[in-house]
Image: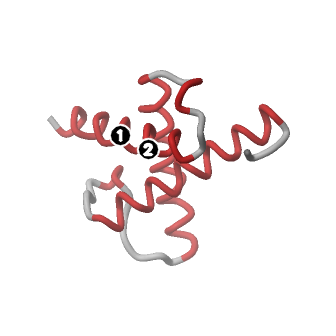
Amino acid sequence: MGIIIWLIVGGIIGWIASMIMKTDGQQGIILNVIVGIVGAFLGGWVGGMLGIGGADINDGDFSLSGLLLSLVGAVVLLAIVNLFRRGRVR
């Protein structure tokens, strides 16, 4: 059951991040899930290095700080992808 919730929350976070970065029309549901999950790993890793409190969704932390950290990681991931794909962040 945890994996299903993890995929759903990762998909929602990826979808919100793609709407923030205006790439929603270019990617489907599978890419939204991937962006959400990888963004959560990225947000948790960077947040841990910077000493920011709160874990990401991959640690099972579904608190507001964990969800926001995962969202920030997903937005940063999309910005990096846009930078390499288009030569600009957008």
Q: Is 56 left or right of 35, judged from the image as shown?
A: left
- The answer to which image quadrant residue 85 occupies is top right
Find residue 16 and name its label. 2
Please name whichever residue, 70 or 82, is drawn nearer the observer in this view of the structure: 82
Packing grade of label 2 (10 A; few <14, some 14-19, many >=20) is some
Q: Is residue 50 above or below residue 25?
A: below
Q: Is 9 left or right of 82, judged from the image as shown?
A: left
Rendering coords of residue 53 (x, y %): 41, 76
Q: Secondary structure at mark 2?
A: helix
| Image quarter of the C terminus | top right
At 37% from the left and 64% from the top, the residue drawn is 55
Find residue 24 and name its label. none
User: What distance separates the C-alpha of mark 1 from that of mark 2?
Assistant: 6 Å
Packing grade of label 1 (10 A; few <14, some 14-19, many >=20) is some
Q: Is residue 54 above or below residue 18?
A: below
Q: Secondary structure at mark 1?
A: helix
Find residue 12 and name its label. 1
Q: Amino acid at mark 1?
A: Ile
- The answer to which image quadrant residue 27 occupies is top right
Q: Farthest left residue?
A: 1
Rendering coords of residue 22 (x, y %): 59, 39
Please name whichever residue, 21 or 35, is drawn nearer the observer in this view of the structure: 21
Q: Amino acid at mark 2?
A: Ile
Rendering coords of residue 24 (x, y %): 53, 31
Q: Is 89 left or right of 72, judged from the image as shown?
A: right
At 19% from the left and 40% from the top, the residue drawn is 2
Q: Could you tell me if the residues under marks 1 and 2 are in contact, i.e. CB atoms within 8 Å?
A: yes
Q: Is residue 44 above or below residue 23?
A: below
Rendering coords of residue 48 (x, y %): 50, 69
| Image quarter of the N terminus | top left
At 52% from the left and 59% from the top, the residue drawn is 45
At 50% from the left and 26% from the top, the residue drawn is 31
